[in-house]
Image: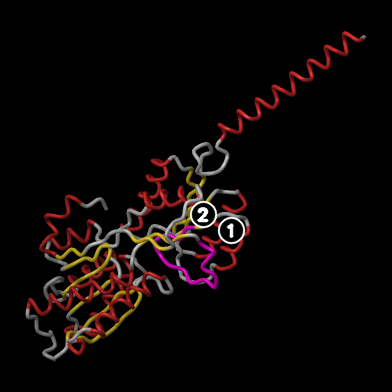
């Protein structure tokens, strides 16, 4: 009996020793925290939809960057509805994803769901567009583009171009008449592009030379852009000198409406828009548009890099902008082959 007890005690001591050694080994090699290299990061991402060439490029960039970074991307298409995005974010919280990123369709209405994410200790990154919150700590970082600067750049280019070309108003008056195709109502990008354009116009030395005839949403789509431009042409006809479209797709739709009305886009009406997609570069090469201000959709690599830093406990900037440029028609042919979207 004594021998049996002694053997049992020895066996028990060996098990304890092995258990301690095994536990220590597993702990040192597991890398259990997200982003530390052991556990694969899962990101929940809510995209607003696929309303344009730009948005398609934005989605492809994010999907490819997640794949390249080894991040498990849970992707959700909101189909232009905020309620779908809120449902998606709540689903990501329920799944216990490591980090959430989303492109907000509109600026407001996010406080409640983002507080739910914060309470669940899931960091949030805002992508591309802006949000208005009562507490900015509800998101860790915002990655995207400077929409106000884009609007500024549009007016600055118009002002320089009209002076250089010595264009005269089509109606024989003293002012250039501008029509604007706005983006989605309530979206930060539409609000800020409009704000940037108007601010630059108000501060210009020759601000009195410009008059905004009409400004209406084209919902960031080609079809709606064509419809609204047709309406502008019926109402204002020969008075329109300049078209500013908040995105290229609406401008491309407007070009169809202008041609249908028997006018020459890019000549009778000066056309400038924002995004910098290949379709707009081709329109400039064809002489049907005059300039596009870049809004860079290739935000995926920066998003994944930022997500990894956040989950590794590194400090990141609250606001990070991607690089952008201005492309007039005279550089379109040279630049198009280099475009990735």
Q: Considering depth in this image, is 205 or 44 the residue closer to the camera?
A: 205
Q: Tell me if mark 2 has few (under 14), some (14-19) or many (20+) residues whose alpha carbon lies within 10 angstroms of its own.
A: many
Q: Position of residue 102 (x, y in %)?
A: 47, 58
The numbered dot on residue 117 is 1
Looking at the image, how many numbered discs can be counted on the residues? 2
Please tell me whether residue 141 belongs to the stretch shown in magenta.
Answer: no
Relative to 47, is 185 above or below?
below
- What residue appears at the point 46 percent right and 43 percent down from the top-left corner? 71
At x 22%, y 52%, the residue is 339
Asked if residue 126 lies in the magenta stretch, the reply is: yes
Residue 169, x across and y down, in percent: 12, 85
Magenta stretch, residue numbers? 125-139
Q: Tell me how far mark 1 sits from mark 2, CA to CA.
A: 8 Å
What residue is drawn where x is 83% and y is 11%?
Answer: 7
Judging by the rendered image, the residue that carries numbered circle 2 is 100
| Observer-nearest of 196 and 184 | 196
Tag 2 secondary structure: strand
**N-terminal label among 1 and 2:** 2
Picture layout, residue 3 above or below residue 86: above
Residue furthest right as drawn: 1
Residue 319 occupies quadrant: bottom left
Q: Nearer the viewer, residue 286 or 95?
A: 95
Q: Residue 101: where, in percent of width, then height?
A: 48, 56
Left or right of 331 on screen, residue 255: right
Do the residues bearing badges 1 and 2 touch, measured as CB atoms within 8 Å?
yes
Q: At 39% from the left edge and 50% from the top edge, which residue is drawn? A: 62
Q: Position of residue 272 (x, y in %)?
A: 21, 70
**2 displayed left or right of 236:** right
């Amino acid at each position: 009996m004594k021998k049996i007890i002694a053997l049992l005690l020895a066996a028990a001591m060996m098990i304890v020793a092995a258990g301690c050694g095994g536990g220590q080994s597993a702990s040192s090699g597991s890398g259990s925290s997200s982003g530390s290299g052991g556990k694969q990061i899962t990101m929940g991402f809510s995209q607003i939809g696929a309303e344009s060439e730009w948005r398609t490029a934005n989605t492809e960039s994010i999907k490819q960057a997640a794949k390249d970074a080894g991040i498990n991307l849970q992707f959700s298409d909101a189909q232009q509805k905020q309620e779908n995005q809120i449902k998606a974010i709540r689903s990501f919280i329920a799944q216990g994803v490591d980090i959430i990123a989303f492109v907000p369709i509109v600026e407001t209405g996010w406080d409640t769901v983002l507080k739910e994410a914060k309470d669940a200790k899931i960091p949030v990154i805002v992508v591309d567009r802006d949000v208005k919150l009562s507490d900015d700590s509800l998101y860790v970082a915002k990655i995207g583009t400077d929409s106000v600067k884009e609007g500024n750049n549009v007016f600055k280019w118009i002002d320089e171009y009209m002076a250089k070309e010595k264009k005269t108003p089509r109606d024989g008056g003293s002012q250039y008449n501008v029509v604007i195709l706005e983006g989605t109502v309530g979206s930060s990008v539409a609000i800020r592009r409009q704000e940037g354009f108007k601010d630059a116009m108000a501060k210009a030395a020759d601000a009195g030379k410009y008059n905004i005839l009409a400004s209406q949403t084209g919902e960031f789509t080609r079809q709606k852009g064509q419809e609204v431009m047709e309406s502008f042409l019926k109402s204002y006809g020969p008075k329109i000198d300049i078209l500013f479209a908040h995105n290229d797709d609406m401008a491309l739709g407007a070009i169809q409406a202008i041609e249908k009305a028997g006018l020459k886009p890019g000549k009778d009406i000066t056309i400038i828009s924002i995004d910098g997609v290949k379709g707009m570069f081709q329109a400039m090469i064809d002489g049907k548009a005059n300039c596009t201000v870049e809004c860079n959709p290739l935000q995926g690599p920066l998003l994944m890099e930022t997500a990894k830093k956040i989950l590794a406990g590194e400090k990141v900037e609250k606001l990070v902008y991607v690089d952008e440029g201005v492309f007039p028609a005279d550089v379109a042919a040279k630049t198009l082959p280099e475009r990735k979207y």
